[in-house]
Amino acid sequence: MAKQVDSVLPGWGLSLGVTLTFLSVLLLLPVSLLLLKVSELSSSEIMAIVSSKRSLAALWLSVRTAIQAAAVNVIFGTLIAWVLVRYRFFGRRVLDACVDLPFALPTAVAGITLTTLLSPKGLYGSYLSEWGIDGAYSPFGITVALVFVGLPFVVRSVQPVLEDMNLDLEFAAMSLGASRLQTWVKVVLPSIVPAMVTGFSLAFARALGEYGSVVFIAGNMPLRTEILPLLIMTRLEQFNYGAACVLAAMMLFVSLVILLGTKFLDGGIRTR
């Protein structure tokens, strides 16, 4: 296999070396230094940092809102991808371009805008207040911000799969008497589930480490609306680099476990 690849790609050894060097400098070296800094602390100090109520509350809030936002994005992101692929309408290209807006818009600008809209006197927040829902400065507001930044990952993961899907399979199913719902569940959904899982993984990873769009809308109240990235920044501002590294390593471990779980799930789905 290596000889076959080498014949197709001249300079395979050089390309592989450059790739591994780049990934090592960009990923492995920073992570290694992070773990090295953590190793300077004793096990009791590490456990005290990890098991503190503030750390656990921030971690749980970050993971919970990231999962909620990714789940919402899977549903509505798939719907948006379906509309963009299967229908032709005026303004379709504008809508398609708007999907990538969270990529281009600075996250701080998004956070300030969402905070203004969801505040008790904001355009959306005033209506939410009538229903007893706190828009800004609450876990709900954090989830909304994470939905905003993670939506493009799901849409761009599902959209190419829908574009490449063979429509003859759907026509054949309907010609055999299947309803639209049955055709969607039996034909379309199994084809796009792997892409949906990939989009969920990317949206979750993006949401878990998000800082700029959340710091304004969260309210940053310890044990209530303080996310883990903000707690890490707080420890850095206090020059407590050991605690910051421990919290960063904890976030890294949790994100790796969840991402590996979704990858195994994705692999199991693809092999069926």
Image (cartoon, rainbow, N blue to C red):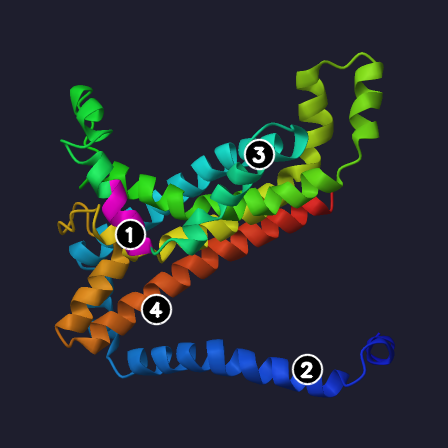
Q: Label 4 vs label 1: CA separation? A: 28 Å
Examine the rendering and report whether any part of residue 60 can be seen: no
Q: Label 2, on which residue? A: 16
Q: Foreground mark, 4 or 1?
A: 1
Q: Earlier in the sequence, mark 4 or mark 1?
A: 1
Q: Earlier in the sequence, mark 4 or mark 2?
A: 2
Q: Label 4 vs label 3: CA separation? A: 43 Å
- Which stretch appears magenta? 107-114
Locate the N terminus by quadrant.
bottom right
Q: Amino acid at mark 1?
A: Val
Instruction: Give SS at disc 4.
Output: helix
Q: Amino acid at mark 2?
A: Leu
Left or right: residue 250 compared with residue 7: left
Q: Label 1 vs label 3: CA separation? A: 25 Å
Q: Label 3, on which residue? A: 92
Residue 12, picture quadrant: bottom right
Res. 180 mark: none
Q: Label 1, on which residue? A: 109
Q: How many marks?
A: 4
Instruction: Give SS at disc 1.
Output: helix
Q: Earlier in the sequence, mark 4 or mark 3?
A: 3
Left or right: residue 26 compared with residue 249: right
Note whether 63 is above or below 190 in the view shown.
Answer: below
Please say if the residues under marks 1 and 3 sit with CB atoms less than 8 Å apart. no
Left or right: residue 62 compared with residue 103: left
Q: Label 4, on which residue? A: 249
**Residue 121, horizontal then vertical, whole percent:** 14, 31
Residue under the image location 13 percent in, 49 percent down: 221
Looking at the image, which is closer to me, 134 or 116?
116
